[in-house]
Amino acid sequence: MEHLASLSRYDLVAALLQSLLIVGAFGTAFGYFTKRSGNRSSNIFFALLLVAFALSIGSLVFEHLGLPAKHPSLRFVPLWFTWTIGPAWFFYVKFSVFPSYQWRWTDAKHFVMPAGQAVYYTAVFFGGLGEIVPETIFGFRATTLDEVIFLLSVFGYLFASYRYLRYKARKIGEQRLRWDYWKVKLLRRSQRVLFVLLTFNFIFVVFNFTTVQQSGVGLLHLRGFYASSSLSFGLILLYLLRGVAYRQHFYPQVPIDDLANVGDSAADRLDALTTTYKGFCDPDLHEVRVARAVGIPPQQLNELAQEKGHKNWWRWIESLRVQEILRLRASKPISLRKASLDVGFASLRVALRALRKRN
């Protein structure tokens, strides 16, 4: 208690807020690892993104609580996994818009630096090498160099993701009732917000670096500046939780205003959204998003599905996906894996289970 009493209010507030973010990130990541909807690979990479962010922020919480100052070995606790953030976001976007993407051996290059960072911190911490780690590298503070590499790599991966999203947007055109039109729109908006937030964080890093180069003393010893800098990093995680995860799973699949002119009844709007525009191919399809788009309570979806002769809404969606797999494979040479992922199944295993039910 005596140690905590010596901390500034900036550090205490920052540590508390970031601890809450960490709890939220781990909870959401667990949900992504275990949820049945959504492309499995996309889910895994978004969960990895949240875990990497949460662990990295954990090291900032340590700093705010003054633990590394009292116990220098804690400075290298293997929590700082910032180089994982760029590739995780990139593959999350990639599998979101191209769910049947097939892994290639060249993709391994994206994980060289993240693996190197993880191995470095693990080796230093458990090998007790903290005392011989240099404070500066090529005249730059090691921590500053680490942050610059992280920010530049994330900007690079944001640009690569932007190119995929732009290509997909051109392919879709102005078909506003397609589920992937709105998914691409969400991801492109998310990219812009992340770019702004990262730029804001980059300004802190550059400002501190400039003062070090000019006067030999940085600004991180000013607790208000350090708290603002670390909270700007936490703000990115908050946006991932609220602006990406929450929106993707609780906002309408297609805005209700765009469906309003399709038909007067909920059944007509549901048919247009689900079958005419193949909304069943959305891997993140679930009752809440569909019901909000159509403008009815989620439980009413089962009633509409039963009117079509199905046990419930989900069985109807499953049957539509199975029919589409059979149509695709009958019309052109296509692997069962690609067909299964393109029609919205989370994985090939889930699709095989649905095909066995049909037979």
Image: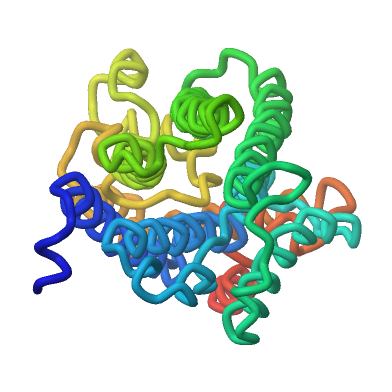
- Residue found at x 30% / y 32%: 293
- Residue found at x 53% / y 62%: 80
Query: Does residue 90 lie above or below 175 as drawn?
Result: below
Query: Residue furthest toward the front?
Result: 215
**What quarter of the picture does the N terminus occupy?**
bottom left
- Residue found at x 46% / y 55%: 53
The answer to whether residue 181 is seen in the rendering is no
Query: Residue furthest toward the bottom?
Result: 127
**What quarter of the picture does the C terminus occupy?**
bottom right
- Could you tell me how many numbered marks the image carries? 0
Position of 6 with respect to 242 (left or right) is: left
Query: Does residue 158 lie above or below 83 as drawn?
Result: above
**Residue 22 appears in which quarter of the rendering?**
bottom left
The answer to whether residue 41 is seen in the rendering is yes
- Residue found at x 39% / y 29%: 254
**Residue 210 appears in which quarter of the rendering?**
top right
Q: Position of residue 137 (x, y in %)?
A: 74, 50
Q: Position of residue 224 (x, y in %)?
A: 26, 37
Protein image colouring = rainbow
Q: Position of residue 253 (x, y in %)?
A: 38, 36
Position of 78 with respect to 258 (left or right) is: right
Q: Who is closer to the viewer here, 206 or 346? A: 206
